[in-house]
Image (tube, rainbow, N blue to C red):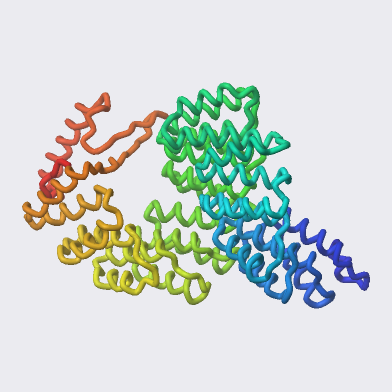
Amino acid sequence: MNANAVSTEERPDNYTVSIALKSCAGLRKLGLGKTIHGFLKKKIDNDMFVGSALIELYSKCGQMNDAVKVFVEYPKPDVVLWTSIVTGYEQNGSPELALAFFSRMVLLEQISPDPVTLVSAASACAQLSDFNLGRSIHGFVKRRGFDTKLCLANSMLNLYGKTGSIKSAANLFREMPNKDIISWSSMIASLMDMYMKCFSPENANDLFNRMPKKDVVSWAVLFSGYAEIGMPHKSMGIFCNMLSNGTRPDAIALVKILAASSELGILRQAVCLHAFVTKSGFDSNEFIGASLIELYAKCSSIDNANKVFRGMIHKDVVTWSSIIAAYGSHGQGEEALKLFYEMANHSHVKPNDITFVSILSACSHAGLIEEGIEIFHVMVNEYQLIPHSEHYGIMVDLLGRMGELDKALDVINDMPMLPGPHVWGALLGACRIHQNIKMGELAAQNLFPLDPNHAGYYILLSNIYCVDKNWHDAAKLRTLVKENRLKKIIGQSMIEIKNEVHSFVAGDRFHGESDHIYEMLRKLDTKMREEGCDSPVETREINF
Protein backbone atom coordinates (compact mmCIF):
# COMPACT_ATOMS: atom_id res chain seq x y z
CA MET A 1 0.00 0.00 0.00
CA ASN A 2 1.41 3.40 -0.93
CA ALA A 3 0.39 6.96 -0.21
CA ASN A 4 -1.68 7.13 -3.39
CA ALA A 5 -3.79 4.17 -2.33
CA VAL A 6 -4.74 6.00 0.85
CA SER A 7 -5.73 9.19 -0.88
CA THR A 8 -7.82 7.69 -3.69
CA GLU A 9 -11.27 6.19 -3.66
CA GLU A 10 -9.76 2.69 -3.93
CA ARG A 11 -9.66 1.94 -0.25
CA PRO A 12 -7.38 -0.94 0.74
CA ASP A 13 -8.94 -3.96 2.39
CA ASN A 14 -8.01 -5.20 5.85
CA TYR A 15 -5.56 -7.78 4.48
CA THR A 16 -3.61 -5.11 2.59
CA VAL A 17 -3.59 -2.84 5.64
CA SER A 18 -2.29 -5.67 7.84
CA ILE A 19 0.55 -6.38 5.42
CA ALA A 20 1.45 -2.68 5.26
CA LEU A 21 1.49 -2.39 9.07
CA LYS A 22 3.64 -5.51 9.42
CA SER A 23 6.08 -4.04 6.90
CA CYS A 24 6.26 -0.83 8.95
CA ALA A 25 6.87 -2.94 12.06
CA GLY A 26 9.68 -4.88 10.41
CA LEU A 27 11.35 -1.70 9.16
CA ARG A 28 10.67 0.17 12.46
CA LYS A 29 8.83 2.87 10.47
CA LEU A 30 6.79 4.18 13.40
CA GLY A 31 5.83 7.48 11.75
CA LEU A 32 4.44 5.82 8.62
CA GLY A 33 2.68 3.22 10.75
CA LYS A 34 0.99 5.95 12.77
CA THR A 35 -0.16 7.58 9.54
CA ILE A 36 -1.84 4.33 8.48
CA HIS A 37 -3.34 4.01 11.97
CA GLY A 38 -4.79 7.50 11.68
CA PHE A 39 -6.28 6.57 8.31
CA LEU A 40 -7.88 3.46 9.81
CA LYS A 41 -9.73 5.48 12.44
CA LYS A 42 -11.45 7.50 9.74
CA LYS A 43 -11.89 5.21 6.77
CA ILE A 44 -12.47 1.55 7.60
CA ASP A 45 -13.47 -0.71 10.46
CA ASN A 46 -10.63 -2.60 12.11
CA ASP A 47 -10.72 -6.35 12.44
CA MET A 48 -8.67 -8.54 14.77
CA PHE A 49 -5.84 -9.06 12.29
CA VAL A 50 -5.49 -5.31 11.75
CA GLY A 51 -5.45 -4.84 15.52
CA SER A 52 -2.79 -7.52 15.86
CA ALA A 53 -0.68 -5.80 13.19
CA LEU A 54 -1.02 -2.46 15.00
CA ILE A 55 0.07 -4.02 18.30
CA GLU A 56 3.04 -5.61 16.53
CA LEU A 57 3.97 -2.21 15.04
CA TYR A 58 3.94 -0.40 18.37
CA SER A 59 5.61 -3.32 20.17
CA LYS A 60 8.54 -3.56 17.75
CA CYS A 61 8.99 0.20 17.97
CA GLY A 62 9.09 0.02 21.77
CA GLN A 63 5.77 1.83 22.24
CA MET A 64 3.93 -0.57 24.53
CA ASN A 65 1.64 2.13 25.93
CA ASP A 66 0.29 2.71 22.42
CA ALA A 67 0.05 -1.05 21.88
CA VAL A 68 -2.13 -1.37 24.97
CA LYS A 69 -4.34 1.50 23.77
CA VAL A 70 -5.02 -0.48 20.60
CA PHE A 71 -5.66 -3.64 22.58
CA VAL A 72 -8.28 -2.08 24.88
CA GLU A 73 -10.25 -0.79 21.87
CA TYR A 74 -11.40 -4.36 21.26
CA PRO A 75 -14.10 -5.42 23.76
CA LYS A 76 -13.62 -9.12 22.99
CA PRO A 77 -10.06 -9.72 21.76
CA ASP A 78 -9.34 -13.13 20.25
CA VAL A 79 -6.31 -15.37 20.79
CA VAL A 80 -4.33 -13.56 18.05
CA LEU A 81 -4.75 -10.20 19.77
CA TRP A 82 -3.92 -11.62 23.20
CA THR A 83 -0.83 -13.32 21.78
CA SER A 84 0.32 -10.04 20.20
CA ILE A 85 0.19 -8.14 23.50
CA VAL A 86 1.84 -10.98 25.48
CA THR A 87 4.60 -11.27 22.89
CA GLY A 88 5.04 -7.50 22.75
CA TYR A 89 5.68 -7.19 26.46
CA GLU A 90 7.98 -10.24 26.48
CA GLN A 91 10.11 -8.91 23.61
CA ASN A 92 10.29 -5.44 25.18
CA GLY A 93 11.83 -6.77 28.37
CA SER A 94 8.68 -6.63 30.52
CA PRO A 95 8.17 -10.32 31.37
CA GLU A 96 6.04 -9.54 34.43
CA LEU A 97 3.45 -7.70 32.32
CA ALA A 98 3.60 -10.38 29.64
CA LEU A 99 2.70 -13.03 32.21
CA ALA A 100 0.05 -10.77 33.77
CA PHE A 101 -1.75 -10.53 30.40
CA PHE A 102 -1.23 -14.27 29.84
CA SER A 103 -2.84 -15.08 33.21
CA ARG A 104 -5.74 -12.74 32.54
CA MET A 105 -6.26 -14.34 29.14
CA VAL A 106 -6.31 -17.91 30.48
CA LEU A 107 -7.85 -17.53 33.94
CA LEU A 108 -10.27 -14.61 33.61
CA GLU A 109 -11.23 -14.58 29.94
CA GLN A 110 -10.85 -18.37 29.59
CA ILE A 111 -9.31 -18.11 26.14
CA SER A 112 -7.16 -21.09 25.16
CA PRO A 113 -3.61 -20.00 24.19
CA ASP A 114 -2.09 -21.31 20.99
CA PRO A 115 1.53 -22.54 20.69
CA VAL A 116 2.78 -19.05 19.80
CA THR A 117 1.26 -17.62 22.99
CA LEU A 118 2.85 -20.37 25.06
CA VAL A 119 6.27 -19.79 23.48
CA SER A 120 6.11 -16.15 24.58
CA ALA A 121 4.91 -17.09 28.07
CA ALA A 122 7.75 -19.61 28.44
CA SER A 123 10.26 -17.01 27.24
CA ALA A 124 8.91 -14.54 29.82
CA CYS A 125 9.44 -17.15 32.56
CA ALA A 126 12.99 -17.68 31.28
CA GLN A 127 13.67 -13.93 31.54
CA LEU A 128 12.47 -13.98 35.15
CA SER A 129 14.27 -17.27 35.91
CA ASP A 130 10.94 -18.43 37.36
CA PHE A 131 11.23 -22.21 37.41
CA ASN A 132 7.93 -22.92 39.21
CA LEU A 133 5.78 -20.84 36.87
CA GLY A 134 7.66 -22.25 33.89
CA ARG A 135 6.99 -25.78 35.07
CA SER A 136 3.28 -24.93 35.38
CA ILE A 137 3.27 -23.70 31.79
CA HIS A 138 5.02 -26.92 30.74
CA GLY A 139 2.27 -28.89 32.45
CA PHE A 140 -0.32 -26.82 30.59
CA VAL A 141 1.49 -27.56 27.33
CA LYS A 142 1.32 -31.29 28.01
CA ARG A 143 -2.36 -31.23 28.97
CA ARG A 144 -3.22 -29.43 25.73
CA GLY A 145 -1.23 -31.90 23.67
CA PHE A 146 1.22 -29.28 22.45
CA ASP A 147 4.31 -31.09 23.78
CA THR A 148 5.02 -32.50 20.31
CA LYS A 149 5.43 -28.97 18.91
CA LEU A 150 9.16 -28.52 18.38
CA CYS A 151 9.06 -24.72 18.90
CA LEU A 152 7.45 -25.21 22.30
CA ALA A 153 9.81 -27.97 23.34
CA ASN A 154 12.77 -25.76 22.44
CA SER A 155 11.28 -22.88 24.45
CA MET A 156 10.92 -25.14 27.47
CA LEU A 157 14.53 -26.31 27.04
CA ASN A 158 15.62 -22.68 27.04
CA LEU A 159 13.50 -22.01 30.13
CA TYR A 160 14.97 -24.90 32.12
CA GLY A 161 18.47 -23.93 31.04
CA LYS A 162 18.01 -20.28 32.07
CA THR A 163 16.67 -21.32 35.47
CA GLY A 164 19.56 -23.72 36.08
CA SER A 165 17.25 -26.75 36.05
CA ILE A 166 19.58 -29.00 34.11
CA LYS A 167 17.90 -32.22 35.23
CA SER A 168 14.52 -31.04 33.93
CA ALA A 169 16.13 -29.91 30.68
CA ALA A 170 17.85 -33.29 30.26
CA ASN A 171 14.62 -35.22 30.92
CA LEU A 172 12.74 -33.10 28.40
CA PHE A 173 15.53 -33.47 25.86
CA ARG A 174 15.43 -37.27 26.14
CA GLU A 175 11.63 -37.29 25.74
CA MET A 176 11.63 -35.16 22.59
CA PRO A 177 10.78 -37.38 19.56
CA ASN A 178 12.33 -34.86 17.16
CA LYS A 179 15.29 -32.57 17.71
CA ASP A 180 16.72 -29.84 15.52
CA ILE A 181 19.89 -27.76 15.79
CA ILE A 182 18.15 -25.42 18.23
CA SER A 183 17.33 -28.35 20.53
CA TRP A 184 20.91 -29.61 20.62
CA SER A 185 22.36 -26.13 21.01
CA SER A 186 19.97 -25.29 23.86
CA MET A 187 20.85 -28.46 25.76
CA ILE A 188 24.61 -28.11 25.37
CA ALA A 189 24.47 -24.38 26.10
CA SER A 190 22.53 -25.13 29.29
CA LEU A 191 25.22 -27.53 30.48
CA MET A 192 28.01 -25.10 29.63
CA ASP A 193 26.18 -22.29 31.39
CA MET A 194 25.76 -24.49 34.46
CA TYR A 195 29.50 -25.19 34.59
CA MET A 196 30.30 -21.49 34.26
CA LYS A 197 27.91 -20.53 37.05
CA CYS A 198 29.60 -23.16 39.22
CA PHE A 199 32.97 -21.52 38.43
CA SER A 200 34.08 -24.61 36.52
CA PRO A 201 35.22 -23.14 33.21
CA GLU A 202 37.44 -26.19 32.59
CA ASN A 203 34.37 -28.45 32.41
CA ALA A 204 32.57 -25.98 30.15
CA ASN A 205 35.61 -25.89 27.90
CA ASP A 206 35.83 -29.67 27.84
CA LEU A 207 32.19 -29.97 26.79
CA PHE A 208 32.67 -27.29 24.16
CA ASN A 209 35.76 -28.96 22.70
CA ARG A 210 33.91 -32.29 22.39
CA MET A 211 31.17 -30.73 20.25
CA PRO A 212 31.52 -32.01 16.67
CA LYS A 213 30.00 -28.81 15.31
CA LYS A 214 30.15 -25.54 17.19
CA ASP A 215 27.49 -22.95 16.43
CA VAL A 216 27.34 -19.30 17.39
CA VAL A 217 25.18 -20.07 20.47
CA SER A 218 27.77 -22.37 22.03
CA TRP A 219 30.59 -19.93 21.28
CA ALA A 220 28.59 -17.08 22.85
CA VAL A 221 27.82 -19.09 25.99
CA LEU A 222 31.52 -19.78 26.42
CA PHE A 223 32.86 -16.24 26.03
CA SER A 224 29.98 -14.61 27.94
CA GLY A 225 30.46 -17.17 30.72
CA TYR A 226 34.09 -16.16 31.16
CA ALA A 227 33.05 -12.50 31.38
CA GLU A 228 30.46 -13.29 34.05
CA ILE A 229 33.03 -15.02 36.28
CA GLY A 230 35.41 -12.07 36.06
CA MET A 231 37.67 -13.21 33.22
CA PRO A 232 36.71 -10.89 30.32
CA HIS A 233 40.23 -11.08 28.85
CA LYS A 234 39.57 -14.78 28.13
CA SER A 235 36.31 -13.81 26.44
CA MET A 236 38.12 -11.74 23.86
CA GLY A 237 40.48 -14.59 22.97
CA ILE A 238 37.56 -16.99 22.52
CA PHE A 239 35.75 -14.46 20.34
CA CYS A 240 38.82 -14.19 18.11
CA ASN A 241 39.00 -17.99 17.91
CA MET A 242 35.36 -18.07 16.86
CA LEU A 243 36.06 -15.70 13.98
CA SER A 244 39.13 -17.72 12.96
CA ASN A 245 36.94 -20.81 13.00
CA GLY A 246 34.68 -19.23 10.39
CA THR A 247 31.67 -18.74 12.67
CA ARG A 248 30.03 -15.37 12.19
CA PRO A 249 28.46 -13.76 15.26
CA ASP A 250 24.79 -12.85 15.35
CA ALA A 251 23.36 -9.80 17.12
CA ILE A 252 23.05 -11.59 20.47
CA ALA A 253 26.67 -12.77 20.37
CA LEU A 254 27.85 -9.25 19.52
CA VAL A 255 25.92 -7.75 22.43
CA LYS A 256 27.61 -10.27 24.76
CA ILE A 257 31.13 -9.64 23.50
CA LEU A 258 30.61 -5.87 23.71
CA ALA A 259 29.51 -6.34 27.33
CA ALA A 260 32.64 -8.42 28.00
CA SER A 261 34.85 -5.75 26.43
CA SER A 262 33.24 -3.05 28.56
CA GLU A 263 34.57 -4.85 31.64
CA LEU A 264 38.10 -4.30 30.34
CA GLY A 265 37.68 -0.67 29.35
CA ILE A 266 40.32 -0.71 26.59
CA LEU A 267 39.49 2.07 24.13
CA ARG A 268 41.49 0.68 21.21
CA GLN A 269 39.72 -2.65 21.58
CA ALA A 270 36.37 -0.85 21.65
CA VAL A 271 37.19 0.96 18.41
CA CYS A 272 38.16 -2.33 16.73
CA LEU A 273 34.94 -4.02 17.83
CA HIS A 274 32.93 -1.03 16.63
CA ALA A 275 34.57 -1.31 13.21
CA PHE A 276 33.76 -5.03 13.12
CA VAL A 277 30.11 -4.32 14.00
CA THR A 278 29.86 -1.79 11.18
CA LYS A 279 31.55 -4.09 8.67
CA SER A 280 29.19 -6.91 9.66
CA GLY A 281 26.12 -4.75 8.98
CA PHE A 282 24.83 -4.65 12.57
CA ASP A 283 25.42 -0.94 13.20
CA SER A 284 21.70 -0.17 12.78
CA ASN A 285 20.66 -2.67 15.48
CA GLU A 286 19.31 -0.75 18.48
CA PHE A 287 20.53 -3.22 21.10
CA ILE A 288 24.04 -3.31 19.62
CA GLY A 289 24.03 0.49 19.42
CA ALA A 290 23.13 0.68 23.10
CA SER A 291 25.91 -1.81 23.91
CA LEU A 292 28.43 0.31 21.97
CA ILE A 293 27.35 3.40 23.89
CA GLU A 294 27.88 1.58 27.18
CA LEU A 295 31.23 0.23 25.98
CA TYR A 296 32.58 3.67 25.05
CA ALA A 297 31.29 5.09 28.33
CA LYS A 298 33.19 2.40 30.25
CA CYS A 299 36.29 3.40 28.25
CA SER A 300 35.78 7.04 29.37
CA SER A 301 35.15 8.07 25.76
CA ILE A 302 31.86 9.93 26.07
CA ASP A 303 32.47 11.66 22.71
CA ASN A 304 32.54 8.32 20.88
CA ALA A 305 29.45 7.20 22.78
CA ASN A 306 27.65 10.33 21.59
CA LYS A 307 28.80 9.77 17.99
CA VAL A 308 27.31 6.27 18.06
CA PHE A 309 24.06 7.67 19.42
CA ARG A 310 23.78 10.51 16.93
CA GLY A 311 24.66 8.18 14.07
CA MET A 312 21.78 5.80 14.77
CA ILE A 313 18.81 6.28 12.44
CA HIS A 314 16.36 4.51 14.73
CA LYS A 315 16.67 5.24 18.43
CA ASP A 316 14.54 3.17 20.80
CA VAL A 317 14.04 3.57 24.53
CA VAL A 318 17.06 1.37 25.30
CA THR A 319 19.32 3.57 23.14
CA TRP A 320 18.10 6.79 24.76
CA SER A 321 18.42 5.31 28.26
CA SER A 322 21.97 4.16 27.50
CA ILE A 323 23.24 7.56 26.38
CA ILE A 324 21.59 9.27 29.35
CA ALA A 325 23.23 6.75 31.68
CA ALA A 326 26.59 7.29 29.93
CA TYR A 327 26.58 11.02 30.60
CA GLY A 328 25.30 10.46 34.13
CA SER A 329 28.11 8.00 34.96
CA HIS A 330 30.63 10.67 33.93
CA GLY A 331 29.11 13.28 36.24
CA GLN A 332 27.64 15.29 33.37
CA GLY A 333 24.16 15.62 34.85
CA GLU A 334 23.26 18.75 32.89
CA GLU A 335 23.98 17.02 29.57
CA ALA A 336 21.99 13.99 30.71
CA LEU A 337 19.03 16.26 31.49
CA LYS A 338 19.26 17.89 28.05
CA LEU A 339 19.13 14.46 26.45
CA PHE A 340 16.20 13.41 28.60
CA TYR A 341 14.13 16.44 27.60
CA GLU A 342 15.17 16.01 23.97
CA MET A 343 13.86 12.44 24.17
CA ALA A 344 10.64 13.48 25.93
CA ASN A 345 9.81 16.50 23.78
CA HIS A 346 11.34 15.88 20.36
CA SER A 347 11.22 12.14 19.70
CA HIS A 348 8.55 9.50 19.23
CA VAL A 349 10.01 7.44 22.10
CA LYS A 350 8.53 7.65 25.56
CA PRO A 351 10.76 7.22 28.62
CA ASN A 352 10.20 4.01 30.58
CA ASP A 353 11.16 2.97 34.11
CA ILE A 354 14.76 2.20 33.03
CA THR A 355 15.09 5.66 31.49
CA PHE A 356 14.07 7.22 34.78
CA VAL A 357 16.61 5.09 36.64
CA SER A 358 19.27 6.51 34.29
CA ILE A 359 18.26 10.17 34.60
CA LEU A 360 17.65 10.04 38.37
CA SER A 361 21.08 8.44 38.83
CA ALA A 362 22.61 11.19 36.69
CA CYS A 363 21.00 13.84 38.90
CA SER A 364 22.22 12.06 42.02
CA HIS A 365 25.84 11.80 40.84
CA ALA A 366 25.85 15.46 39.78
CA GLY A 367 24.17 16.72 42.95
CA LEU A 368 21.17 18.12 41.04
CA ILE A 369 18.68 17.76 43.87
CA GLU A 370 15.90 20.06 42.61
CA GLU A 371 16.10 18.62 39.10
CA GLY A 372 15.99 15.07 40.47
CA ILE A 373 12.87 15.80 42.51
CA GLU A 374 11.22 17.37 39.45
CA ILE A 375 12.10 14.33 37.29
CA PHE A 376 10.58 12.01 39.90
CA HIS A 377 7.32 13.99 39.81
CA VAL A 378 7.35 13.97 35.99
CA MET A 379 7.69 10.20 36.05
CA VAL A 380 4.68 9.77 38.34
CA ASN A 381 2.38 12.58 37.20
CA GLU A 382 3.05 12.95 33.47
CA TYR A 383 3.97 9.40 32.48
CA GLN A 384 1.86 7.59 35.10
CA LEU A 385 4.72 5.22 35.84
CA ILE A 386 4.73 3.49 39.21
CA PRO A 387 8.11 3.97 40.90
CA HIS A 388 9.97 0.78 41.76
CA SER A 389 12.19 0.23 44.78
CA GLU A 390 15.21 1.20 42.67
CA HIS A 391 13.74 4.64 41.93
CA TYR A 392 13.12 5.26 45.63
CA GLY A 393 16.65 4.10 46.43
CA ILE A 394 18.10 6.67 44.01
CA MET A 395 15.97 9.43 45.55
CA VAL A 396 17.29 8.47 49.00
CA ASP A 397 20.82 8.60 47.61
CA LEU A 398 20.18 11.96 45.92
CA LEU A 399 18.78 13.60 49.04
CA GLY A 400 21.32 11.92 51.29
CA ARG A 401 24.33 13.05 49.26
CA MET A 402 23.16 16.66 49.66
CA GLY A 403 22.73 16.31 53.41
CA GLU A 404 18.92 16.18 53.36
CA LEU A 405 18.86 13.13 55.60
CA ASP A 406 15.47 13.83 57.17
CA LYS A 407 13.88 14.14 53.72
CA ALA A 408 15.63 10.94 52.63
CA LEU A 409 14.13 9.15 55.63
CA ASP A 410 10.70 10.57 54.74
CA VAL A 411 11.04 9.02 51.27
CA ILE A 412 11.74 5.64 52.87
CA ASN A 413 8.80 5.94 55.27
CA ASP A 414 6.44 6.88 52.41
CA MET A 415 7.44 3.96 50.17
CA PRO A 416 4.45 1.76 49.23
CA MET A 417 6.67 -1.33 49.39
CA LEU A 418 9.15 -2.57 51.97
CA PRO A 419 12.53 -0.87 51.50
CA GLY A 420 15.21 -3.23 50.25
CA PRO A 421 18.88 -3.35 51.28
CA HIS A 422 19.93 -0.90 48.56
CA VAL A 423 17.54 1.74 49.98
CA TRP A 424 18.74 1.49 53.58
CA GLY A 425 22.30 1.13 52.26
CA ALA A 426 21.98 4.45 50.43
CA LEU A 427 20.86 6.12 53.66
CA LEU A 428 23.72 4.54 55.63
CA GLY A 429 26.22 5.74 53.04
CA ALA A 430 24.82 9.28 53.31
CA CYS A 431 25.11 9.11 57.09
CA ARG A 432 28.78 8.21 56.67
CA ILE A 433 29.33 11.26 54.45
CA HIS A 434 27.57 13.65 56.83
CA GLN A 435 28.53 11.86 60.06
CA ASN A 436 25.00 11.36 61.42
CA ILE A 437 25.45 8.61 63.99
CA LYS A 438 21.85 8.34 65.19
CA MET A 439 20.32 7.97 61.74
CA GLY A 440 23.18 5.73 60.65
CA GLU A 441 22.36 3.35 63.49
CA LEU A 442 18.69 3.43 62.47
CA ALA A 443 19.62 2.56 58.89
CA ALA A 444 21.91 -0.25 60.09
CA GLN A 445 19.21 -1.72 62.36
CA ASN A 446 16.95 -2.11 59.32
CA LEU A 447 19.72 -3.04 56.91
CA PHE A 448 21.65 -5.80 58.70
CA PRO A 449 18.68 -8.23 58.98
CA LEU A 450 17.93 -7.76 55.26
CA ASP A 451 21.50 -8.40 54.09
CA PRO A 452 23.50 -9.92 56.97
CA ASN A 453 26.34 -11.14 54.71
CA HIS A 454 27.34 -7.81 53.20
CA ALA A 455 30.57 -6.83 54.97
CA GLY A 456 30.60 -3.38 53.34
CA TYR A 457 27.60 -2.24 55.36
CA TYR A 458 29.30 -3.16 58.65
CA ILE A 459 32.40 -1.27 57.55
CA LEU A 460 30.33 1.83 56.76
CA LEU A 461 28.88 1.89 60.27
CA SER A 462 32.28 1.17 61.84
CA ASN A 463 33.76 4.15 59.99
CA ILE A 464 31.02 6.35 61.40
CA TYR A 465 31.99 5.17 64.88
CA CYS A 466 35.70 5.73 64.18
CA VAL A 467 35.20 9.35 63.15
CA ASP A 468 33.33 9.81 66.43
CA LYS A 469 36.22 8.01 68.22
CA ASN A 470 33.78 5.36 69.44
CA TRP A 471 36.37 2.60 69.31
CA HIS A 472 34.33 0.24 71.51
CA ASP A 473 31.39 -0.10 69.10
CA ALA A 474 33.75 -0.16 66.12
CA ALA A 475 35.58 -3.10 67.71
CA LYS A 476 32.29 -4.92 68.30
CA LEU A 477 31.49 -4.66 64.61
CA ARG A 478 34.96 -5.89 63.73
CA THR A 479 34.45 -8.93 65.97
CA LEU A 480 31.04 -9.60 64.40
CA VAL A 481 32.50 -9.52 60.89
CA LYS A 482 35.28 -11.93 61.85
CA GLU A 483 32.94 -14.32 63.69
CA ASN A 484 30.62 -14.49 60.68
CA ARG A 485 33.59 -14.77 58.29
CA LEU A 486 32.33 -11.94 56.14
CA LYS A 487 34.51 -10.73 53.30
CA LYS A 488 34.30 -7.35 51.64
CA ILE A 489 34.32 -7.39 47.83
CA ILE A 490 37.50 -5.53 46.98
CA GLY A 491 37.06 -2.53 44.72
CA GLN A 492 39.18 -2.61 41.57
CA SER A 493 40.50 0.27 39.48
CA MET A 494 41.96 0.01 36.00
CA ILE A 495 44.03 2.35 33.85
CA GLU A 496 45.07 1.93 30.21
CA ILE A 497 48.65 2.89 29.31
CA LYS A 498 50.00 2.20 25.83
CA ASN A 499 47.20 -0.27 25.01
CA GLU A 500 47.85 -2.24 28.20
CA VAL A 501 45.39 -2.31 31.09
CA HIS A 502 46.78 -2.14 34.63
CA SER A 503 44.54 -3.29 37.46
CA PHE A 504 44.79 -2.17 41.11
CA VAL A 505 43.04 -2.76 44.42
CA ALA A 506 43.40 -0.82 47.69
CA GLY A 507 46.81 -1.48 49.25
CA ASP A 508 47.88 -3.42 46.15
CA ARG A 509 51.36 -4.98 46.31
CA PHE A 510 51.05 -7.37 43.37
CA HIS A 511 51.80 -4.91 40.58
CA GLY A 512 55.34 -5.10 39.30
CA GLU A 513 55.85 -1.37 39.76
CA SER A 514 54.38 -1.20 43.29
CA ASP A 515 57.53 0.22 44.90
CA HIS A 516 57.73 3.04 42.36
CA ILE A 517 53.99 3.71 42.60
CA TYR A 518 54.02 4.09 46.39
CA GLU A 519 57.16 6.20 46.28
CA MET A 520 55.40 8.55 43.86
CA LEU A 521 52.35 8.67 46.15
CA ARG A 522 54.55 9.61 49.10
CA LYS A 523 56.11 12.42 47.08
CA LEU A 524 52.66 13.68 46.02
CA ASP A 525 51.46 13.56 49.62
CA THR A 526 54.49 15.56 50.78
CA LYS A 527 54.00 18.11 48.00
CA MET A 528 50.30 18.51 48.84
CA ARG A 529 51.09 19.09 52.52
CA GLU A 530 53.70 21.69 51.58
CA GLU A 531 51.03 23.47 49.56
CA GLY A 532 48.76 23.53 52.61
CA CYS A 533 46.50 20.58 51.73
CA ASP A 534 45.77 18.38 54.73
CA SER A 535 45.17 14.68 54.32
CA PRO A 536 41.42 13.98 54.02
CA VAL A 537 41.82 10.73 55.94
CA GLU A 538 40.30 11.17 59.37
CA THR A 539 39.63 7.60 60.37
CA ARG A 540 41.92 4.98 61.76
CA GLU A 541 42.28 2.08 59.33
CA ILE A 542 40.52 -1.03 60.55
CA ASN A 543 41.82 -4.36 59.35
CA PHE A 544 38.84 -6.59 58.63
User: In which image quadrant can residue 434 be found?
Assistant: bottom left
Q: Residue furthest front?
A: 143
Relative horizontal placement of residue 52, taking residue 448 as reference (left or right):
right
User: In which image quadrant can residue 255 be found?
Assistant: top right
179 or 70: which is nearer to us? 179
Q: Is residue 476 above or below residue 354?
A: above
Q: Is residue 171 above or below residue 67?
A: above
**Where is the C terminus found, in terms of image quarters?**
top left
491 or 268: which is nearer to us? 491
Name the residue located 30 percent from the left edge and 67 percent from the top edge.
Answer: 399
Q: Position of residue 319 (x, y in %)?
A: 55, 54
82 or 399: which is nearer to us? 82
- The image shows a total of numbered marks equal to 0
Q: Is residue 175 above or below residue 117?
A: above
Q: Position of residue 130 (x, y in %)?
A: 52, 52
Q: Position of residue 512 (x, y in %)?
A: 26, 24
Name the residue located 58 percent from the left edge and 46 percent from the top edge.
Answer: 159
Q: Can I make out residue 98 in this image?
A: yes
Relative horizontal placement of residue 358, taking residue 106 as reference (left or right):
left
Q: Can I make out residue 534 in this image?
A: no
418 or 474: which is nearer to us? 418
**Where is the N terminus found, in terms of image quarters?**
bottom right
Q: Position of residue 339 (x, y in %)?
A: 50, 61
Relative horizontal placement of residue 280, taking residue 417 as reference (left or right):
right
Q: Residue furthest right?
A: 10
Name the residue located 50 percent from the left edge and 30 percent from the top edge.
Answer: 236
